[in-house]
Image (spheres, grey):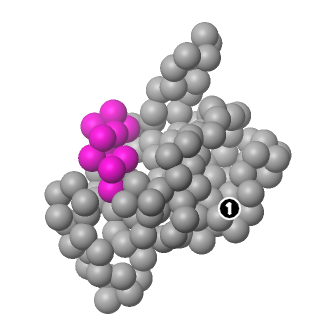
Amino acid sequence: MTHSNLYGPYELKAETIDKKVPKGIVGNFLLGESSSDKNGFSIFSFGSSYSDINVELKKFVGNYKHFQYSFAYSKYDTFYLDCLNHHEFKHASVNDDNYEHPEPPKGCNWFCPVCGFYGHNE
């Protein structure tokens, strides 16, 4: 199953990503802002990568202040957690992209574990 630990929060900067996030791993991330007392994290967006979370996170540098991430053991685990994040955080997100249900990777006919959504991939 998905690795349950979230790493971070860290500053969303390319050099920080390279220091903290291994290259070539699949997984999920939360984007937002850490509170000044370090006890909270406001989630503004979330996402995943089926190939390299390090590369994917760098696409958001300059748009958000902080990130947290978790690695997954497989693409299925990445999709599973992406679905859970979608259902839990889509209304709190300021990113309109998070309103559409995540799609599984191409060629994978997986169902959402929360609502049963069936991806459109072939």
x 65%, y 64%: residue: 25
Q: Residue furthest front?
A: 1
Question: Dividing the picture into quarters, in which one does residue 38 lie?
Answer: top right
Please say whether residue 113 is one of the residues in the magenta stretch: no
What residue did someone put label 1 on? 55
x 64%, y 35%: residue: 8
Q: Position of residue 58 (x, y in %)?
A: 68, 53
Identified by mark 1, the residue type is Val
Inspect this view and state whether residue 92 appears.
yes
Q: Where is residue 30 in the image (x, y as percent from the top left)?
A: 51, 42
Q: What stretch is highlighted in magenta?
A: 83-93
Q: Position of residue 120 (x, y in %)?
A: 26, 79
Residue at disc 1, secondary structure: helix
Question: Dividing the picture into quarters, in which one does residue 44 lie?
Answer: top left
Answer with left or right where residue 30 lies relative to residue 38.
Answer: left
Q: In which quarter of the image is the C terminus?
A: bottom left
Inspect this view and state whether residue 59 appears.
no
Q: In this view, does 43 lie above or below 106?
A: above
Magenta span main SS = helix
Q: Quadrant of the N terminus?
A: bottom left
